[in-house]
């Protein structure tokens, strides 16, 4: 059976081909239409639609550990429309899974991508999610991801959100997590905002169990008339909890950036650190590269590439 | 005539005179050292040559191959063939070693980048995919900066305290690079207060409180370096001038 033409075009927008998905679990959604999916033993994928939403249920069976990442491709090829995805992921005890997700909106003029996710990691489960956005140059897209994450004892959770290609448009991200004993939580966002792009990131984590760790990292470049606001709230509530918040934003042109970190320690044997650097490109970095012959713009680009790499 | 000349260069920073009426000649293909106590103006001299921000507005003139550097930006000076290795190299979060060392020569091949890393004693396999960030020690960053200069292949290299913060093995590699650059005909200006570094030079300038106190062959300057510099407290510069006057080197 020949593939859905929309699937071919969606995958082409992220330089992928259908045969790359053979033998792996995968899911492709164009707008609110599921155009491809595949599962493997131990990885249970259910999809449905309800109203204007796509419902996705993922269960990774206890003890199953996948070496190959699960491929997700969510996108919208038309210039206008709304994509709503309601996603539940349950990674059971001792299971391990990683996701390679592409969100592609190559033609967006007036598009909304709304993601509402609930993620539950069982005891000693492993989960990593790399999400790369590919946007149009028009800036006509609004990305609104919401995630509620819970980590059981010993679980490891890592997520990385990358939006470097094309215009951001508007991003309004809201992630919150709770972490039980000896679990590890890592969240990283790398975003390049230009022209009149708007970025708002809210990340909150409660380290509730003994020895739980959490790292919240946001690296942004804000140029043109773009603006960014980063709200982080990290609480360490039990003995041995360790947390770190790292917010770096390079601001150029008429860009504006705010970082509002809240770090809380509610146990004398817990520890949280915070670092933030917001402003123009570091003068010493700039002059070092200029002393190799790069002009100011090229040197700035290289520094930003590094920060966002 | 030197490849680089100072013609009565003076510089004030925050109302303090840091360089005072300096006239110096740096000869092409030679290794020059600029020595003197802390606060003598040695690093300022290097930064002024490079035209770094805050150091570009000086009295007098700096000539490269007979042409004034006045008004040229840092990168314009770099494109003429002048570059600087910092006493404490910058950290670049996320920037890869290969991208950094190749910055001064667009299109440099992987072989060129790897060869430069080998010259500074760093294994390309181990280092080319590293980042120039806090995961590297100060000594490693110093060697990586030197690798970037090797790839750039400039005519004049200003090296500010090339041996500070590095271990003995790294110092040997840095000295070896100085020797190789000299062999290629690169003009090197070493900013130092280390006798070991001074010994790599052919010729040296002694600065104190922004004044040129003496200049001459390294052997003779080494004699001053151990004893005569130390008593200088910056308040008695005229007395020091008298002291050197007896040695036939005062300006």
Image (cartoon, coloured by chain):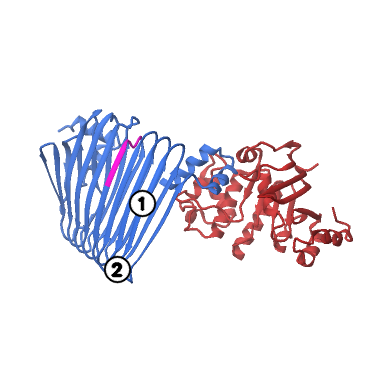
Chain colours: A blue, B red
Q: Where residue A88 appears, x then y in whole percent?
A: 16, 50
Q: Where residue B213 appears, x then y in whole percent?
A: 80, 56
Chain ID of residue with mark 1: A
Is A168 a magenta residue? yes
Who's the residue at 41% across and 35% down the image? Answer: A225
Label 1's element?
A: strand
Say which mark, if any, is on residue A260. 1
For mark 2, what is the residue?
Answer: A211
Who's the residue at 77% across and 53% down the image? Answer: B211
Chain ID of residue with mark 2: A
Can residue A104 be seen in this snapshot?
yes
Is A64 a magenta residue? no
Say which mark, if any, is on residue B47. none
Tell me the magenta residue range: A166-173
Q: Where residue B133 appears, x then y in whole percent?
A: 48, 54
Could you say which quadrant of the image residue B169 lies in?
bottom right
């Amino acid at each position: 059976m020949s593939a859905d033409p929309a699937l071919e075009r969606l995958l082409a927008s992220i330089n992928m081909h259908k045969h790359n998905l053979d033998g792996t679990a995968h899911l492709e959604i164009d707008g609110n239409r599921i155009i491809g999916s595949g599962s493997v033993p131990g990885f249970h994928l259910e999809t449905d639609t309800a109203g204007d939403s796509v419902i996705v249920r993922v269960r990774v069976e206890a003890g199953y550990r996948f070496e190959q990442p699960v491929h997700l491709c969510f996108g919208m090829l038309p210039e206008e429309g709304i994509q709503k995805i309601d996603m539940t992921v349950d990674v059971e005890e001792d299971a391990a899974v990683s996701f390679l997700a592409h969100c592609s909106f190559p033609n967006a003029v007036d598009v909304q991508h709304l993601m509402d996710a609930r993620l539950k990691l069982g005891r000693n489960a492993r989960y990593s999610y790399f999400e790369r956005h590919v946007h149009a140059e028009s800036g006509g897209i609004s990305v609104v991801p919401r995630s509620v994450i819970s980590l059981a004892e010993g679980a490891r959770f890592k997520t990385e959100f990358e939006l470097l290609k094309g215009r951001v448009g508007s991003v309004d991200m809201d992630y919150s997590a709770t972490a039980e004993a000896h679990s590890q939580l890592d969240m990283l966002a790398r975003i390049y905002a230009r022209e009149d792009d708007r970025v708002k990131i809210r990340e909150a984590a409660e380290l509730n169990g003994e020895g739980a760790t959490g790292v919240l990292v946001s690296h942004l470049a804000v140029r043109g008339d773009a603006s960014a606001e980063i709200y982080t709230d990290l609480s360490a509530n039990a003995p041995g909890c360790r947390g770190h918040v790292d917010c770096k934003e390079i601001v150029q042109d008429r860009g504006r950036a705010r970082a509002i970190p809240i770090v809380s320690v509610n146990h004398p044997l817990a520890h949280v650190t915070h670092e933030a650097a917001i402003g123009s490109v570091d003068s010493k970095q700039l002059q070092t590269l200029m002393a190799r012959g790069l002009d100011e713009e090229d040197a700035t680009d290289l520094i930003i590439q590094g920060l966002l790499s | 005539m030197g490849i680089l000349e100072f013609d009565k260069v003076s510089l004030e920073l925050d109302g303090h005179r840091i360089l005072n009426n300096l006239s110096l000649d740096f000869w092409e293909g030679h290794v020059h050292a600029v020595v003197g106590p802390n606060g003598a103006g040695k690093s300022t001299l290097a930064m002024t040559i490079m035209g770094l921000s805050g150091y570009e507005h000086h009295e007098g003139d700096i000539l490269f191959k007979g042409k004034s550097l006045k008004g040229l930006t840092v990168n314009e000076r770099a494109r003429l063939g002048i570059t600087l290795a910092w006493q404490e190299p910058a950290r670049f979060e996320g920037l890869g070693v290969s991208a950094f060392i190749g910055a001064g020569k667009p299109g440099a091949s992987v072989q060129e980048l790897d060869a430069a890393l080998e010259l500074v004693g760093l294994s390309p396999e181990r280092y080319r995919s590293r980042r120039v960030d806090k995961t590297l020690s100060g000594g490693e960053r110093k060697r990586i900066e030197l690798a970037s200069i090797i790839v750039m292949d400039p005519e004049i290299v200003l090296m500010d305290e090339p041996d500070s913060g590095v271990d003995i093995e790294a110092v040997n590699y840095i000295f070896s690079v100085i020797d190789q650059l000299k062999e290629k005909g690169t003009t090197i200006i070493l900013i130092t207060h280390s006798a070991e570094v001074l010994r790599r030079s052919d010729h040296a300038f002694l600065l104190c409180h922004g004044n040129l106190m003496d200049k001459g062959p390294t052997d003779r300057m080494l004699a001053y370096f151990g004893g005569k510099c130390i008593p200088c407290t910056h308040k008695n510069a005229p007395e020091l001038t008298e002291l050197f006057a007896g040695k036939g080197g005062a300006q």
